[in-house]
Amino acid sequence: MNKNVALAALLGLGLSLNATSASAVLYHYVDWTSANVAGGTATGTITLPDSSTVTVNFEAITSTGGAGSLNFAQTTGGGTNYWAYNAGAPYISTEVDNAPPDSDIISLVGGVNQTYKVTLSEAIKDPIMAVLSLGQAGVPTTYDFDSPFDIVSQGTGYWGGTATSLSELPGDILSGAEGHGTIQFIGTFSEFSWTVPTPENWHGFTFGIRTTEAIEPSPIPAPGVLGILGMGLAGLGFLRRRRKT
């Protein structure tokens, strides 16, 4: 085995590790348990596989600091499951393994006088928001966030739309023209907020996080992987010494 073959083996291992880390992740969504439509608030919990929970609070705040309002809210699994259309395809991608599992949704209208805010009981790494029917065909509506995000999935949803109906604009703005899909916030957050400058009939969202690794530092490679890399590097060192003798 010469040095070039050893290098190729190490590169192949690196590509394999990268491919594994890029696989889809199971997300856990909010069980919205209560909502005050007129008062503009909602509360829910996310239950993780280890039975720990994260509390999620939502509030709409007017420009004068008073309580805003919701359009409607579906809680504890009641109402129409808008997320299930086309087997949840608009909400699934190489980054997100699963769509919201039930009908829970917070419905907004928007308008320049309201700010929407989500607060979490603890800081969460890279949370996601599933978005339903943002804007209308030919009449875009925007979510102007205070935090950076990436669009990680989109497609034809309950009210139509296409695979390009959502777009990311400069300034952390999500634009939708009948957009159905998922965005992922980049970083670690205990709260974030957004405005909807252009109101429309209604659009909706829910919220999700990964398993417990979402609230912990990124995992380091397993000892077995480190051992393989170490053996490869040692082999390269041996080959270099051998060439000099």
Image (cartoon, grey):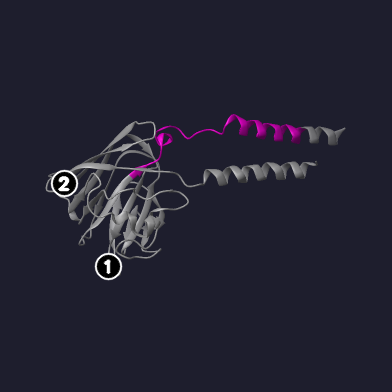
Residue 227 among those drawn in magenta: yes
> Callout 2: 10 Å neighbours few (<14), some, many (20+)?
many
Looking at the rendered structure, the kind of residue marked 2 is Gly
* 64 or 31: nearer the viewer: 31
Mark 1, secondary structure of its residue: loop
Which x, y percent locates residue 26? 42, 43
> Callout 1: 10 Å neighbours few (<14), some, many (20+)?
few
Which x, y percent locates residue 166? 36, 60
First in sequence, mark 2 or 1: give its number: 2
Tell me if residue 183 can be seen.
yes
Q: Quadrant of residue 80?
A: bottom left
Determine whether, in the image, residue 199 is placed left or right of residue 180.
left
Determine whether, in the image, residue 229 is placed left or right of residue 28.
right
Residue 144 among those drawn in magenta: no
Which x, y percent locates residue 48? 36, 35
Q: Quadrant of residue 177?
A: bottom left
Image disc number at residue 139: 1
The residue sitting at 80% across, 42% down in the picture is 2
Tell me if residue 90 can be seen.
no
The residue sitting at 41% across, 37% down in the picture is 211
Answer above or below: position of 77 versus 219.
below
Mark 2, secondary structure of its residue: loop
On-image quarter of the C terminus: top right
Looking at the rendered structure, the kind of residue marked 1 is Val
Image disc number at residue 40: 2
On-image quarter of the N terminus: top right
Task: Give the magenta range.
Answer: 208-237
The residue sitting at 72% across, 43% down in the picture is 7
* 62 or 164: nearer the viewer: 164
Which x, y percent locates residue 50? 39, 31
